[in-house]
Image (tube, grey):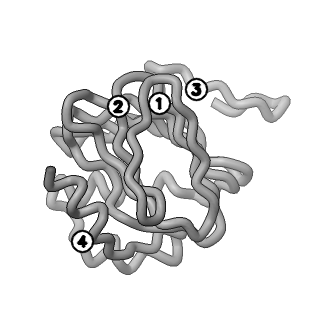
């Protein structure tokens, strides 16, 4: 809920949770001009986002609990509870829960750009209400540009 003094308070019980994917839940927290924020929980080994980059936004990761495997360019790193990462525009990245643990992660994009509709589209695809071509067609709108990464494929196949 946005208040008159322009602060934003989102109560956990009121946050929109997207749960069509049985291996992940995305909780939408803030979608403002300056930032977009969500909390995502991934079950052990579950994929999050495939390799992609942003042209305008930096993406911040803060691991609240568990372990998150992350592609950074041509390197794969594992983030643990309490780790913080900033991926600047132009850097290919991907992420998913590490093999032996769930992952609970706070994501912040700055600047924000109405990204909640992207997460809702992903949820509709999981429910069979939209198709993957709609995701591909939305890359410019949501500043999510998909790339191929043999490094990521090899890391996730382990």
Locate the N terminus and report the quarter of the image it occupies: top right
Tell me: 104 left or right of 143.
Answer: left
Whole-number angstrom distance, CA of label 4 to CA of label 2: 28 Å
Which residue is more in the foreground, 158 or 37? 158
What is the number of the mark on residue 10?
3
**Where does residue 41 sit, x and y in percent of width and height?**
33, 33
Residue where numbered disc 4 is placed = 132
Mark 4 or 3: the one toward you: 4
* Secondary element type, mark 3: loop
Tell me: 139 left or right of 151.
Answer: right
What is the number of the mark on residue 67?
2
Whether tag 1 and tag 2 are in contact, CB under 8 A, the answer is yes
Answer with mark 3 or mark 2, whichever residue precedes in sequence: 3
Q: Residues within 10 Å of mark 3 (few under 14, many from 20)?
A: few
Residue where numbered disc 1 is placed = 63
* Secondary element type, mark 4: helix
Whether tag 3 and tag 2 are in contact, CB under 8 A, the answer is no
Whole-number angstrom distance, CA of label 4 to CA of label 3: 30 Å
Which residue is more in the foreground, 123 or 151? 151
Whole-number angstrom distance, CA of label 3 to CA of label 2: 26 Å
Q: Residue furthest right?
A: 5
Residue at (42, 65) in percent of width and height:
74
Answer with mark 1 or mark 4, whichever residue precedes in sequence: 1
Q: Residues within 10 Å of mark 4 (few under 14, many from 20)?
A: few
């Amino acid at each position: 809920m946005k208040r008159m003094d322009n602060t934003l308070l989102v109560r956990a019980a009121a946050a929109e949770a997207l749960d069509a994917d049985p291996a992940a839940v995305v909780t939408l927290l803030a979608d403002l001009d300056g930032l977009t924020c969500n909390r995502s929980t991934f079950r052990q080994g579950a994929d999050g986002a495939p390799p992609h980059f942003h042209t305008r936004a930096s993406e911040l990761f803060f691991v609240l609990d568990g372990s998150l495997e992350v592609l950074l360019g041509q390197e794969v790193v594992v983030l643990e509870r309490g780790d913080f990462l900033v991926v600047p525009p132009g850097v290919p990245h991907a992420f998913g829960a590490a093999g032996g643990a769930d992952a609970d992660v706070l994501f912040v994009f700055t600047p924000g750009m109405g990204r909640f509709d992207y997460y809702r589209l992903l949820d509709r695809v999981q429910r069979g209400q939209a198709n993957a071509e709609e995701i591909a067609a939305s890359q410019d709108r949501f500043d999510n540009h998909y790339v191929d990464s043999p490094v990521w494929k090899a890391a996730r196949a382990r």
